[in-house]
Amino acid sequence: MSAPMLGVYGVSYRYGERQVLDEVSFELEEGEIHSLFGPNGSGKSTLLKIIAGVIALDAPGSSGQIRHRGTDLLALTPLERARVVAYVGGDLRADFPVTALEAVLLGRICHSGGMFQQFSAQDRQVAREAMERCLCWGLRDRELATLSGGERQLVAVARALAQGSRLLLLDEALSRMDLNHQAQMGAVLKALASEGRAIILVSHDVNLASEWAASGLLLKNGRRLGAGPIRELLTRETIQKLYPGAELVICPHPVSGAPKIFFS
Ligand code: ADP
């Protein structure tokens, strides 16, 4: 059997004295959309940033392995790693004026050989296709800073697609999109997965995540509380463990059957 697309093994992390991840492990296969669930501060963002190599696992008290098809993802150079994994946060900002198209083209740096190389016609074509797919080609000449939060999120996902990475880490990356765009991006994510990418979603909107992800992991205080197919994972019992301060009911979606959570 071949090694999984992503293997996260025994990841622990400390910010100073505070342990925020404690021996977290899971595996992800290509074609999967996986969601991390947990209350604020449970370590979801930190875990995604570790997988992406944004946070190094070298702080005291930190340990674990991140493997891509069996190879050590964290041992790759940043450019090599960017060809494998793309991290998309909740907001895309640039320190200098760029158009939306230029922001997406920056995702091609890992293919064009570095910051100071010219982008090729192929890079431009890939960027265009990514923007068309993410419904933001019409924004290409707008300055990034002038776009709305939801528009910038479309551009950020397009940049990750242009990057060509097989593994997409979406950290509250759709939170500012309107319902039309969330629905359309949900369809795009499912299509990307069916084409062989793997996606990890972090969203406070549990109902949105449960619609698109087939599997998930529950995190609380940096510890894994459970993992598995969404329909088995999101139960009244597990939701109560995650959010004990809220009176919640859980019911299947009338059409899709995916578990949905409501205030009672
Ligand atoms: P989540 O994404 O689940 O809300 P985070 O991974 O952002 O959780 O944060 C986990 C914990 O780490 C929180 O207690 C948070 O306050 C803490 N934390 C996050 N970033 C830093 C940082 N740069 N320095 C110190 N503590 C941090």
Image: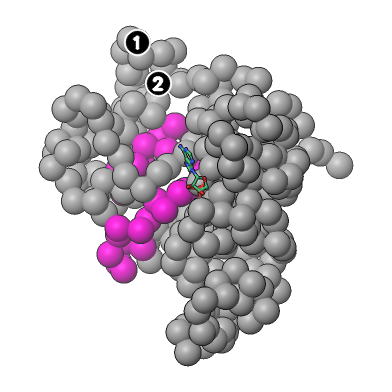
- Residue 110 versus residue 191: which sits nearer the camera? 110
What range is drawn magenta here?
154-182
The label shown at residue 109 is 2
Percent of width and height locating residue 62 = 67, 32
Q: Which quadrant of the view contains residue 36?
A: bottom right
Q: In this view, does 127 lie above or below 222?
A: above
Q: Residue at x 54, y 42 (%)?
A: 46
Q: Which quadrant of the view contains residue 230?
A: bottom right
Query: Does 163 lie within the magenta span?
Result: yes
| Contact, mark 1 vs mark 2 (Cβ under 8 Å) | yes
Is residue 129 visible in the rendered image? The answer is no
Q: Quadrant of the N terminus?
A: top right
Q: Which amino acid does label 2 sit on?
A: Ile
Q: Residue at x 70, y 46 (%)?
A: 22
- Residue 52 versus residue 99: which sits nearer the camera? 52
Q: Mark 1 points at which residue?
A: 117
Q: Which residue is drawn at 30% across and 58% down?
A: 176
